[in-house]
Amino acid sequence: MPVAAPVVDLTLKAKLCQGLADPSRLGILEALRGGPLSVTELVLATGLSQPNVSNHLACLHGCGLVI
């Protein structure tokens, strides 16, 4: 008989999916593959505005994808 996944595990998986669900966030993650970048460097690398990058970084941080 299958056992249901713990609710906490599902919540973490949902957060991960949320973090990966936006092309802008994927672009930021791709830019960060080479190592840490400042917000200014991410703006230049992605073509996004500074407030947009900051907002997406907050989401990625909340999802546990960046520190």
Image: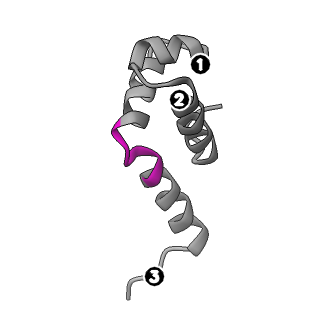
**Badge 2 or badge 1: first in the primary sequence:** 1
Q: Are marks 3 and 2 in contact (CB under 8 Å)?
A: no
Which residue is label 2 attached to? 53
Q: Residue furthest bottom?
A: 1
**Badge 3 or badge 1: first in the primary sequence:** 3
As shown in the figure, which amino acid type bears the numbered disc 2?
Val
- Residue 36 percent coordinates (x, y): 58, 15
> How far is the residue under mark 3 from the one under mark 2?
40 Å
Label 2 packing within 10 angstroms: few (<14), some (14-19), many (20+): many
Decide: is 55 above or below 35: below
Per the rendered image, the range of residues in magenta is 18-23
Q: Mark 3 or 1, which is nearer the eye?
A: 1
As shown in the figure, which amino acid type bears the numbered disc 1?
Val
Q: From the image, which quarter does the N terminus lie in?
A: bottom left
Decide: is 15 above or below 56: below
Q: Is residue 58 visible?
A: yes
Q: Is residue 13 magenta?
A: no
Numbered tag placed on residue 39 in the rendering: 1
